[in-house]
Image (cartoon, rainbow, N blue to C red):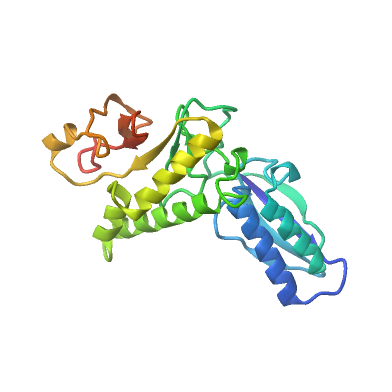
Amino acid sequence: MYLVDLLFECFEDTTLSRAEQAILGYLDALRYNGQIIGRELPTSIQDGWFKSRVVCPEPDSLHPRHHSEQVQLAERRLHQAGLLAPKVELDGPDLFSDSTDACTQPHWQVLYTSFLHTCSPLRCGEHFAPIPLYRIPPVANGDHKQVIKWQEDWEACDQLQMNGSIAEHAALHEMSEVGSRLFRRGWDLCKRIEFLTKTPTYYYLYRVGGNREEELRRPCPQCGGDWRLAEPLHEIFDFKCDTCRLVSNLSWDFKE
């Protein structure tokens, strides 16, 4: 990931509220297209211009060739608010972020996230590195907002079950059961992404608790087939069903 400054200059008189709304709309459009990562978007007011600090998957993530229709519309709204399209200043790599996947065409990919991650939830199956969402065709309505919203919901559930103070069991159900609403949304997204990219796309089912002996024999919850891997994959996945496009871990209670 890379730290980038966006500089918004005024070319005519405007108001703070108009500028604020236009900049926020532009940043949201970039975020829902996967061009910037995370919801923390600090923006400072300068003398006749504004500066936003953002995190991008790649040095050229903000190049116009990656823009969605929504980003292009948001840029026109910047002009209507008296602001120029932002100047992009690359600050450098973010020391504590994941490195973006270098594959041009992964053999398979997985929809995976956690409350600790702020990168793209789509990862290369071979390298487990995040794939920028703008590399794939829009999932719906011209961008990837549905994928980002699924990611936010999954991470919220993960945070609740890790805290263990409120709604822990409800959150765990959403993350680990094939009948949950969160699963159905994510699994549908996987099928849509696979259709668009022509790349097998798997969904990650979280697993904790259970009985150790039963856990080792746990069948695929979707088809009932044998899906235990001979060796763990990426030190996380112990189960993988190629029929149902599911991966899962041995219960974290029994992980060595």
Query: Percent position (x, y) of residue 124?
Result: 49, 32
Q: Which image quarter is the N terminus in?
A: top right
Q: Residue at left 40%, top 44%?
A: 187
Q: Is residue 222 above or below residue 37?
A: above
Q: Residue at x 60, y 40 (%)?
A: 137
* Residue displayed at 73% across by 54% down: 72
Q: Give whichever of 256, 32 is nearer the camera.
A: 32
Q: To which quarter of the image does residue 251 belong?
A: top left
Rendered view: 76 above or below 18: above
- Using the image, determine if residue 76 lies above or below residue 199: below
Residue 46 occupies quadrant: bottom right
Residue 91 seen by the camera: yes
Where residue 118 appears, as percent x and y from the top left, is 50, 50
Q: Quadrant of the C terminus?
A: top left
Q: How many marks?
A: 0
122 displayed left or right of 204 = right
> In this view of the protein, which residue sits in the foreground, 58 or 123?
123
Q: Is residue 11 left or right of residue 38?
A: right
Q: What percent of the width, then of the height, locates residue 173? A: 27, 54
Q: Residue furthest top?
A: 230
Q: Residue at x 24, y 37 (%)?
A: 255
